[in-house]
Image (spheres, coloured by chain):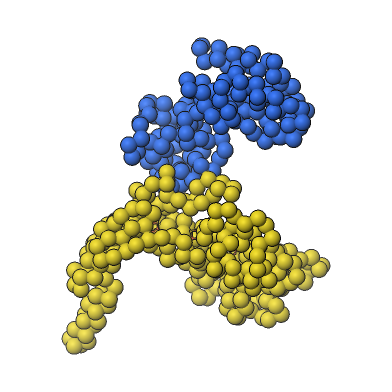
Amino acid sequence: MNGRPCVDAAPLDEILAHYPASETALIQVLQDVHRAYHYLPCDVLAKVADALDVPLAKVFSVGTFYKAFSLVPQGRTIVRVCTGTACHIRGASRLIEEIERQLEIKPGETTEDMGFTIKTVNCVGACAMAPVMIVGETYHGGAEPAKVAKYLAETEADHEN
Amino acid sequence: MSGGANDAGGKGTMVTLTIDGRVAKVPEGATVLDAARAIGVRIPTLCQHEALEPWGGCRLCLVDVTKKDWRGWEKMVVSCMFPAEDGLAVSTATERVVATRKAVLDLLLARCPDTPLVQKLAREYGVERTSYRENPEPTDCILCGLCTRVCDAIGVSAIATVDRGAGKEVAPPFHEAPPDCIGCLACAEVCPTECIPYQTSDSARTIWGRRFEMVRCPHCGRAHITREQATFYAGRGGVPESYFTTCDACKRTQMARTFTTLSAVR
Ligand code: SF4
Ligand code: SF4
Ligand code: FES
Ligand code: FES
């Protein structure tokens, strides 16, 4: 749309094929789109609106409502660091410092090669395991700054497969 | 009257309730707010509009309700949504109702410190200044949702709320000129704080950053509707576009002429 670069529509077609063309499928479709593209590209949102026959304004509304969705491109792996009370007390800030040092970006930013995005989150409900950091979909409880490089390398290996 | 109040077709059951001790009789399906208005009891509202389904968003229309067999138990409900029932006793100004409305207005005033409507309502409840931190970026939008709901009701849905929490706002998709908008101005007209800017002239109309060409009435030449409006209404109702491009005044004149002709024939 409006001069923004278009993305490859093939993953979207594949996603849409799995769902009924109705508003009820909207959130699931957006979740799959997010997984496939690592964000919600605007031209994809316009196509989702068409395909599900939902007004574009509604699609945009839902896409901006949930924290799980991003409208700007994100890294292939999201690194989430819990900064809830328990994790904060048990050293979340030292974890963040180490991740920042390793990836050379700050929370909210994405590495140049689109490999990683760092995010801070509030309590993920695993306080007993504090401090918690989540790399992609892998939870690391009792996370240690010294092991950050290892946690990150594990997902990089996944990317290569 | 909102909701299904008219479904009974005039012959439906009536319910009797009391509001601040006064008796109100309304058709089944009417809300407590409808009943209060019917007997002239004022309840403040911000997100309610008779042409739209109640939404219960602003919480200003709170009232206390109870019934004889509730053994003294009372609950606070939003009167714009709560159905009027037989034997319901409504109190519109109990201490806790007033305190809650005051809290709602205090918060609204923090969000919209410069908005005359909010200031006025807050003052009525004794709030001159918000007790919270004032919004560093004051807005006039109280997020009542009337604009988006009226746009939905027309069947367009060109705008919606965007984002969440403190950053929530009403906007077109991608904050760009909305592709679906027909330039009808209904959103701007329904907005209680008049915070949706637009310009309209004989040649063009601009709203939400989108520019519309105006169509002139073929009879008097008055520019009263956008091309997109005429096309949208015609497409929806199966009525020719020319019906909509003719302005209301000319439609009335034509109608009057038809009636005169008809009565002459008779
Ligand atoms: S002017 Fe546009 S956004 Fe406003 S109600 Fe009409 S169609 Fe909807
Ligand atoms: S723009 Fe106006 S009508 Fe729309 S939500 Fe804000 S205050 Fe309500
Ligand atoms: S504070 Fe981190 S999991 Fe609860
Ligand atoms: S008027 Fe009832 S909640 Fe807004």
**Which image quarter is the C terminus of chain B in?**
bottom left
- Residue A159, horizontal then vertical, whole percent: 52, 15
Q: Quadrant of residue A120?
A: top right
Can residue A4 be spotted in the picture?
Answer: yes
- Picture residue at 19% right of the left edge, 84% below the top: B261
Measured as percent of width and height from the top left, residue A65 is found at 54, 43
Residue at the spot 21% in from the left edge and 85% down from the top edge? B260
In the image, A12 versus B147, the foreground residue is B147
Question: Quadrant of the rendered structure where residue A101 is?
Answer: top right
Residue B176 on image: x %, y %: 38, 46
In the depicted view, which residue is nearer to us: B184 or B25?
Answer: B184
Residue A46, position as x, y percentages in the image: 39, 39
Is B238 placed left or right of B23 in the picture? left
Q: Residue at x 63, y 15 (%)?
A: A149
The shade of chain B is yellow
Instruction: Please name the color used to draw chain A.
Output: blue
Asked if residue B115 is positioned above or below residue B262 in the image, the reply reads: above
How many labels sit on residues? 0
State left or right for residue A148 relative to residue A111. right
Q: For residue B212, what is the image quadrant? A: bottom left
